[in-house]
Image (tube, helix red, strand yellow):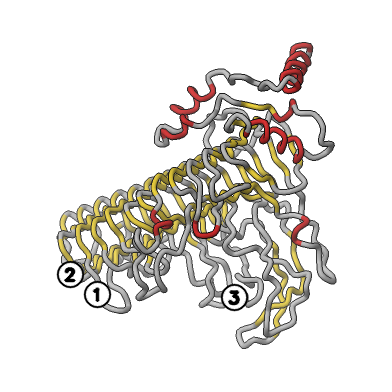
Amino acid sequence: MKSIRRRQFLQTSALAAGAWAFPRQPALAENLRPVWAPDAPWIASLKWQQVIDISAIEGGGKYWDARLKKAQAMLAEKGGGVVLFPEGAYPFEDSIRLGDGIILRGALRKDSAHDEDYSRRLPKIVFPKYEPTFKGEGTPIDTAFKGIVLDEPATASNCGVVDLAIDRGHIYLGEAEGYRCGRNRLIYGCELTNAAVADPNTPGSKKVKQPAWQRFTARHHAAIDAKSSENLLIARNRLPKSGQDNFTMKDYVLEGRKGEEVRFDVVFDYDNRPGLYINHYCIGGAGGSGDDGTPESHPYGFRKGTIIRDNTIHNSGRMGIGFAGDGVVCSNNVIRFEKDVFRPTATGIQATFGSSTNDNRAIEARGWRWVIDGNDYEVDRNICSDGSYRINDGEGIMHEDHCNSDIRDSRLTNNKGNSYLSLYKCGLIDGLLVEGNDISVPGDIADIYVVANRNSGPQPCRNVTIRNNITRSNGIHIAGDPGEKNAILNNEHIGGGGTIINEARAKIEGNKGYRA
């Protein structure tokens, strides 16, 4: 006890004298780089040695907003550094505005985000809880739904959040108007619960009168949304099942199929949100025929240095991971969707039917030269308002024409999942390896689609190799014209009904279990 009190005294005295609480955290930068960022060498250039312990800053009362603001200001005078959160809970009243060069972090952790007890002993930042009222205008949205955002997104660089639990808050490392964006950003080792945001445009029906108190999750607001002009590490984060803050709205008013008023019990579901949006942009035209995105037409969609790895994501709906870029590495992530979720609305306005979509998919890829490797996913389609049909989505790993580019020099390897690989109607495919995947798909559709042709006409498909995969539903479909230097080799189909549809002049050799 005496040693703890002496340490606190020395920390407070050091701060009062204008010095650092921890002039040098022992072996901090040296230990971190080989443990968790050998694939991101720029991490070593961040100012890990300049550390302020937030618990050593006095004042502020119940909330920690003022103390964090003071700590960031002190670090800013030295060009940036680390605000350290020791073990404990830290309530905040408002969103945290993260400054240039600042890293918020807890203690160094070595366990995996795939472990169930990952949050044990993580310092926790707690934002206000939304307390719904089901009458009148309802509880204002701005009473809750806070998060960690950048103070100056156009320029903020060398910053991030490391080894912290965050309850009732999201992380948004965004950009400014005109896609102006800083560089060298990271979100590492964090656990986020109840991270959804309320849609400010709901209720908003023009056909039926929706009560003003109705609330619905924002469809495109991810728990973690990060952008960086160059170098972005999103690793070892965990989005477990939330649930404890979910609330049910009885007799929620929606538009029916013909615009009539219908009512359902609708859950404000904190896990019905995208998990990770990482430099996620629309970089092409409309589905079926749109122009391809290129580094010239959409430079912000082809940023380099993005790594998304070793994350665990629980969703009840929406997308697990969505990214765009040039050379993105998306590896060893675990994605689980809650099964058999009744979803009477996907928008908060219209009721769902078989043609509705909630964008339930594991991974959505956009851009060139991506590597999607070693991911483990289980996707589930939500149940429509009629209680019998499923919503029209459910892809496993997808690079499709809508809002996208063609495919160049990419790798889709060693993934395991319960839904199909959909490289579909994406225009030119030039350089693609699909290898070592284990795919099982419900229904009579292909496990692996590599289809360049669009609705508007044929597209080239060349230099594609599909080999050593396991399929379990209906096999492999490759298509493109002209088709050149393509091969389908040594794949195995388990169970009956496997086919190989070859519409790209592929060499076929050594495959097992497929009908001729």
Calculate the distance from the C-alpha at mark 2 to the C-alpha at mark 3: 40 Å
User: Is residue 447 in view?
Assistant: no
Q: Residue at x 35, y 58 (%)?
A: 295
**Mark 3 vs mark 1: in front:** 1
Q: SS of the residue at dot 3? A: loop
Relative to 509, 190 lies left or right: right
Q: Which residue is mark 3?
A: 352
Q: Are marks 2 and 1 in contact (CB under 8 Å)?
A: yes
Q: Residue at x 32, y 60 (%)?
A: 495
Q: Are marks 3 and 1 in contact (CB under 8 Å)?
A: no
Q: Amino acid at mark 3?
A: Thr
Tell me if mark 3 has few (under 14), some (14-19) or many (20+) residues whose alpha carbon lies within 10 angstroms of its own.
Answer: many
Q: Position of residue 208 (x, y in %)?
A: 71, 83
Nearest to the observer: residue 406 or residue 336:
406
Q: Amino acid at mark 1?
A: Pro
Q: Quadrant of the N terminus?
A: top right
Q: Position of residue 161 (x, y in %)?
A: 59, 39
Calculate the distance from the C-alpha at mark 2 to the C-alpha at mark 1: 8 Å
Q: Residue at x 71, y 30 (%)?
A: 54
Whichever of callouts 2 and 1 sits on the residue coming sooner in the sequence is 1
Tell me if mark 1 has few (under 14), some (14-19) or many (20+) residues whose alpha carbon lies within 10 angstroms of its own.
Answer: some
Q: Amino acid at mark 2?
A: Pro
User: Is residue 410 in view?
Assistant: yes
Relative to 202, 303 lies left or right: left
Q: Which residue is mark 2?
A: 482
Residue 276 marker? none
**Mark 2 vs mark 3: in front:** 2
Q: Position of residue 266 (x, y in %)?
A: 70, 68
Residue 458 marker? 1
Q: Quadrant of the C terminus?
A: bottom left
